Image (cartoon, grey):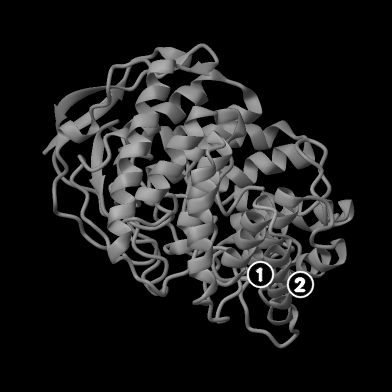
């Protein structure tokens, strides 16, 4: 089949010129075969690390699946237009992004008329759309965007069910976003009502006999994010320190208990499982949990985070050695397996693989001030640059937009131009939205999931306009 290879060097030390070659075969990509079906399947388009050839790779995060449908080679030919001028995104590229955002928003709003009316989640439902409009309001200060966020918040409040408590997949997301939207509209009563309901969820999170997991999508780390998000957006002690500390310690104690059960206390003091498997990535695994714990501390490098001061001893004695344990599970390619038991170097997604782990390493560098973490984050970024244009499409969880956030985060930290360039090149892929032959998923207009994942693509495009202010949604504080 026709394939493409990345060659040359240029802006910021790299150039994404694509030249046609011929190659045979395809690479099946997948994760653990015995895991549950959620979240939805993930697929990647990867550049083979030995031949340099761009090869088709189908994947689910939990189950191997062969991929037979070829990808059109023209889908991977980016525009020659300049995307970055020195340390800034070029005006022409910004204009292109703005026009595409307007176009996609119109398509999204039309498509949402037939979306599941009962899906209130941030991951695939109405809260994700509200969060998108909050981001657009933050970027543009247009009152209409804040009003649209309110419209979707009101829609979610009528259908919450109390079954899950996380920001991405449960009630905590709609309630936390509601707190913020109502606060921005000076509606104190409704903002406080949402906050009260959010805090009531802690009962199930802290219950000693709770079987709740600790990961981000369905577990305690996802509830912790909701609390930290509210404090970041509104201010100090909106959620009091003791509440956040209780949630942090519940996560820590759970990890210590699992580590002791597995006899890994010396090697990995904090160990976690989801559905009987020890995942590594950001969505269900160790990297996402450690990342959230590191964010739940008083920090001086960005804004002082109100709430939990994770004690320095806890950071040094439990979190840092656990991070180092994960670091040493990397492949020679600098990608990471989906779980500790998986030896397949296939998935290059935020949910599973280097695009999620890179954020843990960046945060470890900020917290522990050790260059090894930054160096290894840069190595992860190379994997993403080579293999990060995903066959699944444009989304955040397992798509090109989610992978692009690695470059934005590294650019914010290092100010190296090549990361801005790469972030823009991934955005350029999203500008060609709908032309890459990806199949349409069940929820194509959502924030996190889906091949077309229209809201996720718009969110990422809006970030590229002001890269210094970018912030990975529902994950980064």
Image point (22%, 49%), residue name: 438
Quadrant assignment, res 386:
top left
Image point (83%, 64%), residue name: 245
**Vertical comparison of 71 with 278: above or below:** above
Quadrant assignment, res 68:
bottom left
Residue under label 1, please give it: 220
Disc with the residue nearer the chain's start (2 vs 1): 1
Quadrant assignment, res 230:
bottom right
The picture places residue 171, in percent across and down from the top left corner, at: 58, 72
Q: Residues within 10 Å of mark 1 (few under 14, many from 20)?
A: many
Image point (23%, 27%), residue name: 77
The picture places residue 302, in percent across and down from the top left corner, at: 75, 37
Label pair 2/1, CB-CB below 8 angstroms: yes
**Vertical comparison of 466 with 442: above or below:** above
Mark 1 element type: helix
Q: Nearer the viewer, residue 70 or 132?
A: 132
Mark 2 element type: helix
Image point (27%, 22%), residue name: 79
**Vertical comparison of 18 with 452: above or below:** above
């Amino acid at each position: 089949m026709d394939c493409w290879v990345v060659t040359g060097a240029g802006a910021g030390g790299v150039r994404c010129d694509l030249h046609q070659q011929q190659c045979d075969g395809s690479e099946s990509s997948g994760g653990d075969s015995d895991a549950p079906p959620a979240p939805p399947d993930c697929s990647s388009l990867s550049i083979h690390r030995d031949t340099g050839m761009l090869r088709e790779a189908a994947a689910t995060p939990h189950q191997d699946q062969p991929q037979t449908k070829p990808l059109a080679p023209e889908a991977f030919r980016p525009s020659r237009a300049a995307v970055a001028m020195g340390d800034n995104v070029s005006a022409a590229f910004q204009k292109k992004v703005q026009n595409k955002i307007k176009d996609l928003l119109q398509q999204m709003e039309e498509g949402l008329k037939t979306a599941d009316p009962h899906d209130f989640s941030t991951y695939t439902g109405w809260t994700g759309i509200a969060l998108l409009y909050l981001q657009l309001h933050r970027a543009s200060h247009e009152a209409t965007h804040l009003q649209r966020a309110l419209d979707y918040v009101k829609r979610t409040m009528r259908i919450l069910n109390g079954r899950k408590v996380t920001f991405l997949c449960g009630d905590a997301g709609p309630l936390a976003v509601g707190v913020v939207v109502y606060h921005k509209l000076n509606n104190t009563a409704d903002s406080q009502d949402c906050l009260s309901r959010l805090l009531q969820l802690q009962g199930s999170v802290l219950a000693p006999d709770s079987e709740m997991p600790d990961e981000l999508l369905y577990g305690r780390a996802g509830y912790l994010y909701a609390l930290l998000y509210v404090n970041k957006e509104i201010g100090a002690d909106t959620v009091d320190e003791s509440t956040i500390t209780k949630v942090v310690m519940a996560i820590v104690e759970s990890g210590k208990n699992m580590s002791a059960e597995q006899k890994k206390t010396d090697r990995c003091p904090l160990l976690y499982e989801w559905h009987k498997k020890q995942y590594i990535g950001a969505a269900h695994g160790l990297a996402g949990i450690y990342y959230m714990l590191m964010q739940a501390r008083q920090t001086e490098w960005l804004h002082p985070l109100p709430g939990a001061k994770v004690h320095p001893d806890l950071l040094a004695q439990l979190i840092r050695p656990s991070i180092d344990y994960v670091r040493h599970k990397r492949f020679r390619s600098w990608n990471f397996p989906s779980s500790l038991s998986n030896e397949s170097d296939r998935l290059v997604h935020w949910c599973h693989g280097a695009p999620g782990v890179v954020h843990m390493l960046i945060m470890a560098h900020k917290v522990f001030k050790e260059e090894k973490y930054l160096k290894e984050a840069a190595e992860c970024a190379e994997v993403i640059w080579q293999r990060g244009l995903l066959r699944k499409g444009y989304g955040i969880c397992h798509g090109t937009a989610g992978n692009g956030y690695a470059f934005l985060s590294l650019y914010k930290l290092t100010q190296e131009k090549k990361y801005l360039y790469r972030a823009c090149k991934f955005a350029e892929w999203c500008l060609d939205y709908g032309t890459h032959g990806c199949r349409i998923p069940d929820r194509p207009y959502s924030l996190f999931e889906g091949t077309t994942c229209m809201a996720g693509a718009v969110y990422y495009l809006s970030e590229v306009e002001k890269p210094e202010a970018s912030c990975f949604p529902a994950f980064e504080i």
